Image (cartoon, grey):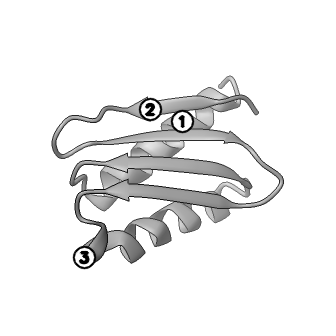
Amino acid sequence: MKIAQAGTIESNDALVIVSPSDKLIVEIDSIVFDKFGDAINQVIVDTLKEHQITCKVVVKDKGAYDYTIKARLITALRRAQNE
C-alpha cells in the first residue's frame, strides 16, 4: 500500500487520505464533527472491515454525506493498492 487520496475540500465533499499503518488510525477534521463525528468514524471503520484493510485514514470533511465519504475512501484504497 502507498499513500493515496480521493475527493476535494469543496463544500459537501470530503478529502480522504490513506497511508500504510500496522494499526487502524482514523483522524477526522469535519465542519459537522460535533453532530456527525461518530457516524463518519463508523462509516470509515465499517468500510475498512468490509475490505479487510488496516491503515491510517485522514478525512477532511466539508459536510459530505456518508455515501460520499465511503466512495472517497474506497477510491483512495484502490489508488493506494494500484488497482
Q: Position of residue 53 (x, y in %)?
A: 72, 53
Examine the rendered structure and indicate whether residue 83 appears above or below residue 40.
Answer: above
Q: Nearer the viewer, mark 3 or mark 2?
A: 3
Mark 2 element type: strand
Relative horizontal placement of residue 57, taking residue 36 as reference (left or right): right
User: Mark 3 — residue?
Assistant: 35
Q: Residue furthest right?
A: 22
Q: Residue at x 78, y 60 (%)?
A: 23
The quadrant of the picture occupied by the C terminus is: top right
Q: Earlier in the sequence, mark 1 or mark 2?
A: 2
Examine the rendered structure and indicate whether residue 18 appears above or below residue 34.
Answer: above
User: Mark 2 — residue?
Assistant: 6
Q: Residue at x 72, y 29 (%)?
A: 2
Q: Residue at x 51, y 31 (%)?
A: 5
Mark-to-mark CA distance, 3 and 2: 24 Å
Q: Residues within 10 Å of mark 1 (few under 14, many from 20)?
A: many
Mark-to-mark CA distance, 1 and 2: 5 Å
Are dots 1 and 3 in contact, CB under 8 Å?
Answer: no
Numbered mark located on residue 76 in the image? 1
Q: Earlier in the sequence, mark 1 or mark 3?
A: 3
Q: Position of residue 4 (x, y in %)?
A: 58, 29
Quadrant in which residue 18 is drawn:
top right
Q: Residue at x 65, y 59 (%)?
A: 25
Mark 1 element type: helix
Are dots 1 and 2 in contact, CB under 8 Å?
Answer: yes
Quadrant in which residue 1 is drawn:
top right
Examine the rendered structure and indicate whether residue 67 appears above or below residue 6.
Answer: below
